[in-house]
Image: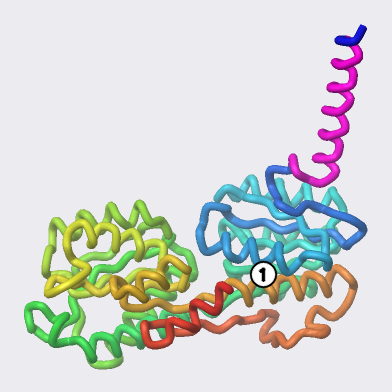
Amino acid sequence: MNNLRKIIVILAMCCIISSILEGCGMNNTDSNTGYKGGLPKVGATIYKYDDEFMSYIRNSMENDAYGRIALNMNDSQNDQNIQLKQVDEMIAKGVKVLAINLVDPKAAQAVLNKAKAAKLPIIFFNKEPEASVLNSYAKAWFVGTDSKESGILQGKMIVDLWNNNKLKWDKNHDGKLSYVLLKGEPGHPDAEARTKYALDEIKKAGIPVEELAEATAMWDAAKAKDKMDGWVSTFKNKIEFVISNNDVMALGALDSLEKAGYVSGNNFIPVVGIDAIPDAVKRIKDGSMVGTVLNDANNQAKAIIDLATNAANGKNILSGTSWKLVNKSVRVHYVTITKDNIDVAEQAYK
């Protein structure tokens, strides 16, 4: 009997623990927070959790949401069909607002149609829908950056860095900036704008350029390293600059360059990225990377949660905030980061 009683007690305790965990949302693999308490429900998606930059936005959103809204975050696993199902599920669970980081910007209309049918406000973030999509629904907005601005700032930074170090970096002394370029996802608005406007600024400054190679690395460090390995093998010392659409790919390129002996001395090849993630900031500080452009994850997250909280409570989305809405969008500005103002990037992640 004693053994039977022990088994019953253990089983009862297991049931209690399981119920507690379920009530806390801890067995929800999609979110660290879940729909808690009596706060208004907001459903959010991230296009994929293992995107390093988006992980900073996600963590900041969860921190900013605490005590204000019941936020449920979902990993769309870089699959638009999964994301569409998640939107249906969140609507079925009674959310007051949707906050969507699209997998594919071309799917914005399909996502918006679901929100519109349920009469829900929707805030797109990071990946920008076409203006016509936003304008088709009064309760749709975008929070993010201006992709063009990041490209312009990266280009201006390259111009300044090249002009200040031309004697060292122009290895064959032909006056041309010979570069390789790591591009993000094909057709992605950020990848296209960053590539175009960075190069436009360099040419506008009167610096002759020579493109040795350009390739897509899908915002991924391992893919960027593979591309860089091939370029180093092919071009060797002909490479005078590495331009990357983001820091993750820049770090992958640096890994390759470091192993080949191109991050110091006379062989040094300058690398620039965009985002100012902490690992890139460290590399700028130690001199192995020369610059980046701060993509302010904390302020983007704050704007998303501020707007979502107001919308969930039936208020004007800008009520009590300092954000400005232009053409249905809240824009968070980029900032150029080099060794001279590295403290600005360090403060952004505190």
Q: Which residue is mark 1?
A: 133
SS assignment for the magenta stretch, majority: helix
Q: Nearer the viewer, residue 17 or 198?
A: 17
Whole-percent x, y for residue 252 in the image: 34, 59
Q: Which stretch appears magenta?
A: 4-27
Q: Nearer the viewer, residue 69 or 235?
A: 69
Relative horizontal placement of residue 63, taking residue 259 as reference (left or right): right
Q: Residue at x 30, y 55 (%)?
A: 225
Name the image quarter holding the C terminus: bottom right
Q: Residue at x 43, y 68 (%)?
A: 191
Based on the picture, tell me whether residue 62 belongs to the magenta stretch.
no
Q: Quadrant of residue 179?
A: bottom left
Whole-percent x, y for residue 334 in the image: 51, 82
Name the image quarter holding the N terminus: top right
Considering only vertical position in the picture, is 287 above or below 107?
below
Q: Residue at x 79, y 72 (%)?
A: 139
Q: Residues within 10 Å of mark 1 (few under 14, many from 20)?
A: some
Relative horizontal placement of residue 25, taking residue 264 as reference (left or right): right
Relative horizontal placement of residue 118, taking residue 112 as reference (left or right): right
**Callout 1 secondary element:** helix
Considering only vertical position in the picture, is 278 above or below 152?
above
Whole-percent x, y for residue 69 in the image: 82, 64
Query: Which residue is outermost to the top?
Result: 1
Q: Nearer the viewer, residue 263 or 153?
A: 263
Relative horizontal placement of residue 153, taking residue 16 as reference (left or right): left
The number of numbered badges drawn on the structure is 1
Query: Which residue is outermost to the front?
Result: 2
Q: Nearer the viewer, residue 343 or 139?
A: 343
Whole-percent x, y for residue 106 in the image: 57, 61
Q: Amino acid at mark 1?
A: Val
Q: Residue at x 85, y 22 (%)?
A: 11
- Rendering colour mode: rainbow
